[in-house]
Image (tube, helix red, strand yellow):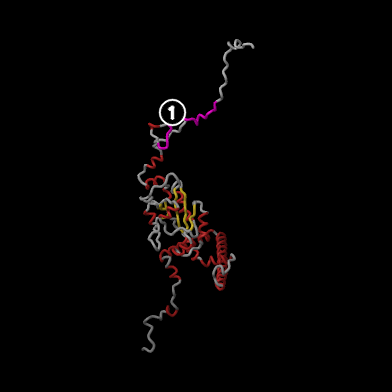
Amino acid sequence: MEDNSLLTADLPTLRQPSPKKAKTNRASSVPPPSVRVASDTDTPDNDSLPTNPFLPRPQSPTSDAASIYSLASGHDLAESMIDKSHIPEGGLPENMVPPPTDRPVRIYCDGIYDLFHFGHARALEQAKKVFPNVYLLVGVCGDKVTHTKKGKTVMHEKERYESLRHCKWVDEVVEDAPWVIDQEFLDKHQIDYVAHDDIPYKSEDADDVYAFVKNAGRFIPTRRTEGVSTSDLITRIVRDYDAYVRRNLERGVSAKELNISYLQEKQFQVRKNVAAVRKSISDKIREGETQIRRNWTDTKNDLPPFWRDTITYWEDASQDLVKGFTGLFGREGVPRLIFRKRPSSAESSPRSTPEAETPSGSS
């Protein structure tokens, strides 16, 4: 056997390839011991700020949120957050509890909302816009408590619930809402504030059903829309009852549905015919007067200038005389002077004087 040790003695030693190491993610690697990772319990003071450039730097404590939290009371905090155009001039109550700043403010409105109108919608809009971020809950009282406390409604409860659900300011409808709000109800629905106009709402059991939330500092006043209300709408219908009954009869609504008798139905039809005849006569008279004025104007324009100017002068003078007469005797005195009882011919005779009248049989 040949000895090969001499052949390999002078050859360099070949480096054996080492096994490949698994690549590691630099971002997920454990930071070096010189870098301390801040924990949840650490306070972001300037002396303990992390030195790792890949970690976010904490915000300065002089941020807007810190300045808001430094306000003295809930009233001041709420005043700094609200839109004052949606509250009365008196502003917010002084005893207001602080509003939440880390979530939407949950505001509650309640009512009957019968014949839902724009006055209702404007009140809900004010409550929705009073804070920048509001979740608006609207409670609608059911038929049972409403008929007991306030009286009969035009719309039943299901119709009133649906009317509120189709209002764009409403986030949630609370059906069969209580007549008086208590702490249990506020806790159940996590209500921060109750919004309503500041006029005391009296009930059989209390002088103001919102006294509890007012005393608790959870009341936000809203502006009442004058000139429109459910009572006003019902008053208009009752005042013009005949016109609305005739209107519905003309549209095919039966007398039974309108809750009127057969005789009343015929009476409404007669009134309708009389009104139509009266309107026709009035239109014809008006049309005739217009034609007469038009003909008179054409005739006057055809006259010689002297006569035309004379007629124009007396027309203007007659108007001035009428105005002066009315101003002298007053508007109420003119009809009395025109329609006063005139004395008879016997009473106006010169012989019918107290001296000439003697009792019969006297000498």
Q: Which quadrant of the rendered structure holds the N terminus?
A: top right
- Residue 119: tell me if it is visible: no
- Residue for badge 1: 33
Q: What is the quadrant of residue 214 in the picture?
A: bottom left
Percent coordinates x, y for residue 187 in the rendering: 42, 52
- Residue 184: tell me if it is visible: yes
Say if 282 sits above or below 216 in the image. Answer: below
User: In the depicted view, which residue is nearer to us: 108 or 20?
Assistant: 20
Percent coordinates x, y for residue 144 in the rendering: 47, 63
Percent coordinates x, y for residue 190 in the rendering: 44, 51
Please give left or right for residue 217 compared with residue 300 in the image.
left
Say if 41 sits above or below 77 in the image. Answer: above
The amino acid pointed to by label 1 is Pro
Membership of 51 in magenta stretch: no
User: In the depicted view, which residue is nearer to us: 319 or 104?
Assistant: 104
Percent coordinates x, y for residue 211 in the rendering: 38, 57
Please give left or right for residue 195 compared with residue 4 in the image.
left
Membership of 40 in magenta stretch: yes
